Image (cartoon, rainbow, N blue to C red):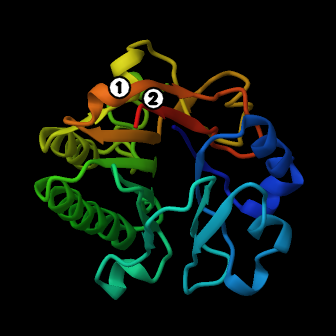
Amino acid sequence: MIIVSWNVNGLRAAARHGFVEWLADASPDVLCVQETKLSADKLPPELNEISPYISRFSFAERKGYSGVALYSKTPPESVETTFGSPEFDNEGRHQFIDYGDFVLANIYFPNGRMSKERLDYKLAYYDAFLKFADSVRSSGRNLVICGDVNTAHKEIDIARPKENAKTSGFLPIEREWMDTLLGHGFVDTFRMFDESPEQYTWWSQRARARERNVGWRLDYFFANEELAPSVKRSWIMADVMGSDHCPIALELDV
């Protein structure tokens, strides 16, 4: 099974840049999308019905904001969009997709740059998600986590670590949470296969950052340690345009 995750920075905008055609050509078994920026009444039929995929969406209460989506060739057993708390459920940031052999969490983690309040919200969301991930793992289920984590984990994951040491997205407290996630029995699957620097998934739209590869690795696939031997590949699709993020991919033997 090949799973792709992509923050499209607006699904309708991505569609204008060839999203549907790209999906037909790439043809992953599953595509998880973040930052759709859609509401139910603004979902175009051509983005809701893309053969041979079934689609599921989670919308934010605030129109044109956040949002995640699933495109899957195989219908999952269930798709949950609640975290159990309105504080975290009303921004349409998550889908929990049950494929039987594993649960797939499609997550658009909050951005903490706008204010201290949003940083606090991001950290609270991180902690609530970790409790969820722990509960899935402790129940004996396998868990794959994908999406935009909105944090570069280590210095190797960002082009300008010193300049961004006090910027949300590379703060010590955010990076420590990622250490904690790995310490709870999860694996950064990309680093299972590639330890090289300058591997990024997001670039500022200013100053030709993507052209110069001045970027951040903000998008990840994590898997619980028990499932890690089934991970065959994990890679970054840096040549795919259409968003300030590029897609990332995982091949799983299930």
Q: Residue at x 55, y 86 (%)?
A: 61
Q: Are marks 2 and 1 in contact (CB under 8 Å)?
A: yes
Residue 163 drawn at (x, y percent): 43, 32
The residue beneath circle 2 is: 158
Q: Is residue 8 above or below residue 192?
A: below
Q: Residue at x 74, y 54 (%)?
A: 52
Q: Is residue 161 visible?
A: no
134 or 127: which is nearer to us? 134
**Image quarter of the C terminus:** top left
70 or 146: which is nearer to us? 70
Q: Residues within 10 Å of mark 2 (few under 14, many from 20)?
A: many
Residue 59 drawn at (x, y percent): 58, 78
- Which residue type carries mark 2? Ile
The residue beneath circle 1 is: 155
- Which residue type carries mark 1? Glu
Q: Is residue 64 above or below residue 201?
A: below
79 or 192: which is nearer to us? 79
Which residue appears farthest toward the top when viewing the image?
196
Residue 18 drawn at (x, y percent): 86, 47
Q: Residues within 10 Å of mark 1 (few under 14, many from 20)?
A: some
Q: Is residue 240 above or below residue 17?
A: above
72 or 201: which is nearer to us? 72
